[in-house]
Image (tube, grey):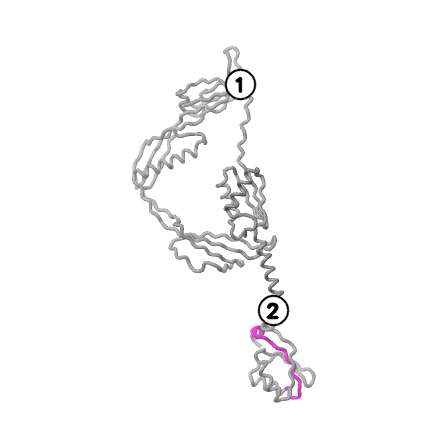
Amino acid sequence: MKNRWIEYYSGILKVKVSGKGIERFLNQLIRMDIHVWNVKRHGTEAVVFSMRLKDAKKLRGPARSYGCKIRFLERSGGPFFLYRLWTNSGFVLGAIVFLFVVIFLSNMVWGIQIKGASPATEHLIRKELDKMGIKTGTLQFFIGSPESIQRELTDNIEALTWVGVDLKGTTYHFQVVEKDEPEKPEMLSPQNLVADREAVIHSMFVEKGEPVVSINDYVKEGDLLVSGLIGKEEEKQAVAAKGEVHGITWYETQVEIPLKSKFQVFNGKEKRKFFIKLGKLAIPVWGFGKPEFKQYETASHDHTIKLFKWELPLAFRKETIRESEQVTRVYTRLEAISSAKEIARKDIKSRLSEDAKIKEEKILHQSIENDKVKVIISFDIIQDIAKEQPIIQGD
């Protein structure tokens, strides 16, 4: 019989019929369009067959007419399965609740371990993690990726050089490298301090050695600033010259700024969607429909659902859709020059040490060509120009 599986979902009965009029009884069933299959004879006055549950009430009339007795041997199929499920609903419900609780607890943060940090830095990290919502009892679905956590911690805590973030099971592990600027070892061998570039001396602070230049002196690269030979001419003693010599140095930078430029910005409007992923299939559970934004960018984050330490083929996906719009920025000549100065300052500072200072800036050239402002700027920078030079025996 075709489509037997459809009959299974509607319910199947296995029936035993006994009596002298079995053949006429079966023929009557066929005339009544009652489907029977797997018909097997049991002795001379009994037969067993299978039939649909919905036709069971139709057996009474033919059985009475032909003097047959009916006995139901087996019941199978969807309705009987649901009945057994209902009678054992307490056990099934308990199993479902237990599985849900286990999955729920397996996707919760139960531990935060921080290694490599001093007590003060560890306190700062834990405070920052609390602000980010990363603490014991938080569901992992609502926590960002390890990469985003790493980036936020590094940006917000100045004491960190690097932090590694690793999620193992229900515990976050943080491996911290703090900023530790080692002290410069004391130079024991005799040395001079010489200029490492062309400059005009601005200020001096000499700890050891004999200064050979004065304020406002012009020096070139390699010129002697502080001698490591001290004492009288006849009894010179070689020491390790130490100190800082700040000089005024010069830099030039060229910047081009378009008077009109277009760029994309987010306007603050956003929509969030949540999905349950089963393999490659994503089933939406919140945030249906297409976004109403004309221009937008989508950022998504998947969090794999775990059972104890094993990852299930299920994942929780969060999508954030942010509306963007195109903005046209138009500079006046003065605004373009001001922006060019700011860009030039940032460029210069990125090439200098932290203690360097800008003393003065001058615009050497400015012009407008092809809707672009071209500016050449000169900077006077005050910075330490001294570098060590060993004193060779016999100098």
**Tag 2 secondary structure:** helix
Q: Residue at x 40, y 35 (%)?
A: 347
Q: Which residue is mark 1?
A: 239
The residue shown at (46%, 56%) is 273
Q: Which residues are magenta?
A: 4-22
Residue 220 as seen in the image, left or right of residue 159: left
Within 10 Å of disc 2 (Cα), the crowding (few <14, some 14-19, many 20+) is some
Q: Looking at the image, which residue sits at the far right?
A: 43
Which numbered marker is on residue 85? 2
x and y percentages locating residue 47 in the rendered image: 66, 82
Residue 144 in the image: above or below residue 209: below
Q: Quadrant of residue 348?
A: top left
Q: Position of residue 114 (x, y in %)?
A: 58, 42
What is the C-alpha distance between the residues marked 2 and 1? 94 Å
Q: Nearer the viewer, mark 2 or mark 1?
A: 2
| SS label for mark 1 | loop
Q: Quadrant of residue 258?
A: top left
Q: Is residue 11 magenta?
A: yes
